[in-house]
Image: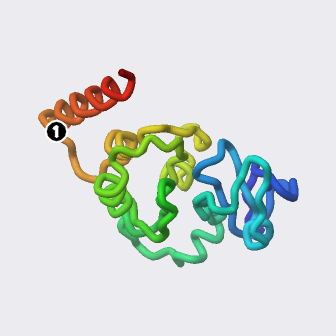
Amino acid sequence: MSRHEGVSCDSCQRANFEGNRYKCLVCYDFDLCDICHSAGVSSDRHNIQHPMQCILTHNDYDLYHGGEAMISDQHQSFTCPVCGRLGFTESLLQEHVSVEHQDSTAQVVCPICVSYSAGDISQTMDDFSAHLLLEHRTSPINNSELISFVIQHTDKHTHRKL
């Protein structure tokens, strides 16, 4: 039996539930089980319009992919936390965010961190584009790109504070 160990649904309070898990990409630490998500649950802190990242249990993930050898970028479907568009690979999400949402300051949760359980999976950030570039970049970054990026984002944040 495959369960989301250590996770409770924030609507029905069911712990260690089976099936898909839906993690809100806007609310801090908000998860729904498949039943509550399908029912369109909302609350005083979670709006039904918030983008959600679907997370499979480990066993369901293995069953779905059937032990296929896969390229790391192709084994997950990510949701953009800014606009809610679905179906991105890691590299396509990075490209989408850099083109469509580079200047967004919306507080969001990283769907890649959530899916891979890396770090604090409930951490919200206001510069998702920078997070993707620094934490999830799929191609090597050279020193001139990094320096240009740091200067650009330092200027952006400096101007925002004025």
Q: Which residue is mark 1?
A: 145
117 to 65, vertically: above or below: above
Residue visible at 68% across and 44% down? 29
Residue visible at 48% across and 60% down? 83
Q: Is residue 72 visible?
A: no
Quarter where residue 2 is shown: bottom right
- Residue 41 in the figure: left or right of residue 161: right
Q: Quadrant of the N terminus?
A: bottom right
Residue visible at 21% across and 46% down? 140
- Residue 99 in the figure: left or right of residue 118: left
Question: Where's residue 75, x and y in %?
Answer: 45, 68
Identify which amino acid the numbered label 1 is placed on.
Answer: Glu
Question: Where's residue 19, x and y in %?
Answer: 73, 69
In depth, the one of 27 and 143 nearer the eye is 27
Residue visible at 33% across and 47% down? 102
148 to 51, vertically: above or below: above
Question: Where's residue 96, x and y in %?
Answer: 34, 60
